[in-house]
Amino acid sequence: MCGLEIPTNDRVIVGMDSLDDAGVYRISDDLAVIQTVDFFTPIVDDPYAFGLIAAANALSDIYAMGGIPKTAMNLVCFPLKQMDISILRQIIQGGLDKMKEADVVLIGGHSVEDRELKYGLSVTGFVHPDRILTKKNLSVGDCLVLTKPLGTGVINTAIKGGTASVEVIERVTQLMAALNRDAAEVMNKYRVHACTDITGFGLLGHLAEMIVGSGCGLELDSENIPILPEAIDYAALGMLPAGAFNNKEFREPMVEFSSSVNPLMRDLLFDPQTSGGLLICLDRNEADKLVDELHQKGIGESAVIGEVISAPLGKILVN
Amino acid sequence: MKEIDARGLACPAPVLQSKSAIEAEQLNTVRVVVDNQAAQQNVKRFLESRGFEIALEKDTDGYYVIGRCDETPLTEPEAAPAAEAGQTKIMVMIATDRLGYGDDELGLKLMTNFEP
């Protein structure tokens, strides 16, 4: 967007100047509309599973803003001459099933013929203007809670290389296809100050976005960060996606690792995630209660992973 | 020293190519060239996991990973046996009772038809 003049108006609550998980526009004193769009190339081989994952991924940004998704439109790029249309049908069925699970109605879509297959959604949701959750507004002393384990990037690369077992593929597919809705429902009962979802920039990349220009820093306890069991092994085998290195190069200047943090763990904290969990920043007195309630709701990997500190400013300490 | 040219390959192909070469030829020294730093880092990690000492270099024509292993490189439990002189043997390990996934009925049928 460098150099482009982007018009705005007073009703835009979250727009291009803040670049949050989604855009938010005030309709009235008690209603705001949230808009987001997300699509990508296949993550897994099974078309139906790809549809589930792409839909869950797109819906997640609405939950991360504290809102509820209501309608969606399909975005399809399909190589009509090279691929059978039945594959597209399965992808869209996956998307539809995920939308049904989220109580979101498909109201349209757009397809183009393209050499490379892509699928995703444009999603509209709603939220009360006073309950919008952005990536900012962290308070010193707050705790950070993560609701899904890390490692989908490295495992997806292993899948691409044909070195992952069927069990691992099934488990990671289920993880990526899981909606953040239940986590958001629990979260919205608490005094949450900020929220984002962990996707392509990796945990450290998304955390870095939260503290840039914020007047605080973060301190993480790496032993409490949930990681998929096979992720460290695949990282050791050199299965890190290129995105992990890009993320590291971009944000490493903001991160200070203590010497006890395993080098492979450092890599995983930059691992780009697909359809990752929510990163919730809330009052420290409520963090344990939130995690307990998330566990009771079946979101068993949720954990307190760190806290917001006053110094060093703009840095993430990882112990 | 065996040189492996993995330029132009998308992740994780450079690692997989290095893996095949090391296992098939039981290499103690290897020089892998890739065209980007991410691949260079991944190959480095892979070789280190197999007991290699690594040196990294950058040249006009690529990023190099030079690996040296004083002892026999570590192998995974399910590694294919080394080829005997004059013979090429290929071992395929299928860890499930059906070939492929997504269609169990077809997968089962394919497995019963498969003749090693």
Image (cartoon, rainbow, N blue to C red):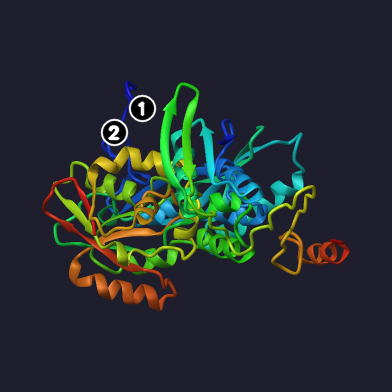
Mark 1–mark 2 distance (CA, rounded to whole Å): 18 Å
SS category of the residue bearing label 1: loop
Instruction: Give the labeled residue for mark 2.
Output: A9
Res A115 visible:
yes
Res A70 visible:
no
Q: Identify which residue is drawn at 37% across, 55% down.
A: A64
Numbered circle sitting on residue A248: none
Mark 1 surroundings: few (<14), some (14-19) or many (≥20) residues within 10 A: few
Mark 2 surroundings: few (<14), some (14-19) or many (≥20) residues within 10 A: few
Number of disc labels: 2
Q: Identify which residue is drawn at 64% across, 36% down.
A: A116
Chain ID, mark 2 = A
Could you tell me the amino acid type at mark 1?
Met
Where is residue A9? Give x, y as percent.
29, 33
Where is residue A202? Give x, y as percent.
38, 49
Instruction: Give the labeled residue for mark 1.
Output: A1
Where is residue B82? Give x, y as percent.
68, 54
Could you tell me the amino acid type at mark 2?
Asn
Among numbered discs 1 and 2, the one appearing first in the sequence: 1
**Closest to the observer, A56 or A101:** A56
**Closest to the observer, A42 or A65:** A42
Residue A287 appears in which quarter of the rendering?
bottom left
Is there a contact, CB below 8 Å, between mark 1 and mark 2?
Answer: no
Image quarter hosting the N terminus of chain B: top right
Q: Is residue B55 left or right of residue B106?
A: left
Q: Nearer the viewer, mark 1 or mark 2?
A: 1
Q: Identify which residue is drawn at 48% across, 44% down.
A: B68
